[in-house]
């Protein structure tokens, strides 16, 4: 359920194309269409997850929103402001409102700095507090993320993977952000540690009114943390829904195949695994029409020609949309697998 209707982040028609250089003069000969015309909204206080296989464009979407890569086109509105009109300086100042937690915190922290120095630097860059106030805040942050204050003067290599991720979370929290982009933030952790970090993220969300854009390839993890879920395939959104609606009433054949791969619990009964044929096509030259048509069991000639738009049917919950020409027909059994 959405906790509030206030739109904190609004993404419209976002495109992220990366040029491919070639030939003698190193000219642009083609583009990787990593994100292609993606629109969605993140409400204040919710966790919106983006899920999909590797190469679907989910992390690229997160990076474009943070302007870690400059988007090719589109609009990104954060808390009523157009982010793409921000200068580099304004974007740096805005960083304190939009933080990121990466999969590998080790790659994004200076291994030669102690945790105290790492956290202090994050606050100092944003002109937060005096030295004494920052020191107090560091101790508070260490305790908030379940690390001891006595560990503040240790170096990152002295911590386990789960603890290092807690340092990443403490660093993100140190500047009091409104939005945190969690980019595969728990993917590298063991399952039991994953659960601890997810529970911590949920607790922090309640305590500090945080909004999360949670990017993951793992629907099992997404199920635990999300309020709403976006499913991406080859740079496009194929389905978006409230978590419950997505997990119990998925409409898009791709979403159904992803869900069928999650191991069943006893209460769910036995599920039939839908195995997709072939690999994800290249985003350099994506399939025409519905990008999923080369692997979709229900594909027709129309699918290869016409791009399906995100839409809803009467029986779907409010806000649940899927991009498929045959949502209703597949549901009713009128449209059967074609291959
Ligand atoms: Fe499959 Fe066609 Fe629907 Fe795409 S539009 S998901 S190819 S049935």
Image (cartoon, rainbow, N blue to C red):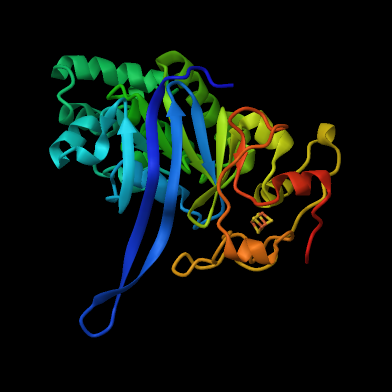
Q: Is residue 336 left or right of residue 55?
A: right
Question: Number of labelled discs?
Answer: 0
Q: Nearer the viewer, residue 234 or 123?
A: 234
Q: Quadrant of the N terminus?
A: top right
Q: What residue sits 35% from the left and 24% below the top?
A: 178
Depicted 62 relative to depicted 293: above or below: above
Q: Residue 87 location in percent, x, y?
A: 15, 40
Q: Nearer the viewer, residue 188 or 100?
A: 100
* Outermost residue to the bottom: 24
Q: Residue 85 location in percent, x, y?
A: 20, 39
Instruction: Indicate the quadrant where residue 177 lies.
Output: top left
Of the four image quadrants, the one with ligand 1 is: bottom right
Q: Residue 276 location in percent, x, y?
A: 70, 61
Instruction: Indicate the quadrant where residue 218 lies.
Output: top right
Q: Nearer the viewer, residue 27 or 60?
A: 27
Q: Nearer the viewer, residue 221 or 62?
A: 62
Depicted 189 relative to depicted 195: above or below: below
Q: Residue 195 location in percent, x, y?
A: 58, 32
Q: What residue sits 48% from the left and 54% below the top?
A: 235
Instruction: Indicate the quadrant where residue 138 lies.
Output: top left
Q: What residue sits 58% from the left and 30% below the top?
A: 319
Q: Quadrant of the C terminus?
A: bottom right
């Amino acid at each position: 359920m959405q906790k509030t209707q206030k739109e904190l982040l609004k993404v419209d028609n976002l495109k992220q194309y990366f040029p491919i250089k070639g030939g003698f003069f190193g000219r642009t000969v083609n583009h990787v269409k990593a994100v292609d015309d993606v629109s969605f909204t993140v409400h204040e206080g919710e966790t919106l997850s983006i899920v999909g296989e590797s190469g679907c464009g989910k992390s690229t979407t997160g990076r474009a929103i943070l302007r870690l890569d400059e988007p090719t086109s589109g609009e990104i509105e954060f808390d009523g402001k157009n982010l793409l009109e921000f200068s580099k300086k304004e974007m740096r100042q805005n960083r304190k409102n939009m933080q990121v937690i990466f999969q590998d915190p080790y790659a994004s922290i200076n291994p030669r700095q102690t945790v105290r120095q790492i956290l202090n630097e994050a606050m100092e860059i944003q002109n937060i507090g005096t030295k004494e106030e920052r020191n107090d805040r560091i101790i508070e942050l260490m305790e908030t993320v379940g690390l001891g204050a006595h560990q503040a003067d240790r170096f990152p290599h002295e911590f386990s993977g789960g603890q290092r991720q807690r340092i990443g979370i403490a660093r993100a929290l140190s500047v009091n952000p409104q939005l945190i982009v969690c980019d595969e933030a728990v993917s590298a952790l063991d399952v039991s540690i994953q659960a601890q970090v997810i529970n911590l993220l949920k607790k922090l969300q309640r305590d500090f009114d945080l909004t999360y854009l949670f990017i993951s390839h793992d629907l099992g993890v997404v199920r635990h943390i999300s309020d709403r879920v976006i499913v991406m395939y080859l740079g496009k959104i194929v389905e978006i829904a409230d978590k419950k609606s997505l997990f119990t009433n998925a409409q898009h054949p791709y979403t159904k195949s992803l869900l069928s791969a999650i191991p069943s619990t006893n209460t769910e009964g036995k599920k039939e695994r839908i195995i997709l044929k072939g690999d994800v096509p290249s985003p350099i030259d994506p399939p025409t029409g519905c990008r999923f048509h080369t692997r979709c069991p229900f594909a027709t000639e129309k699918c290869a020609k016409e791009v399906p738009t995100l839409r809803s049917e009467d029986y779907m919950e409010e806000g649940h949309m899927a991009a498929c020409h045959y949502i209703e027909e597949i549901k009713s059994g009128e449209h059967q697998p074609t291959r």
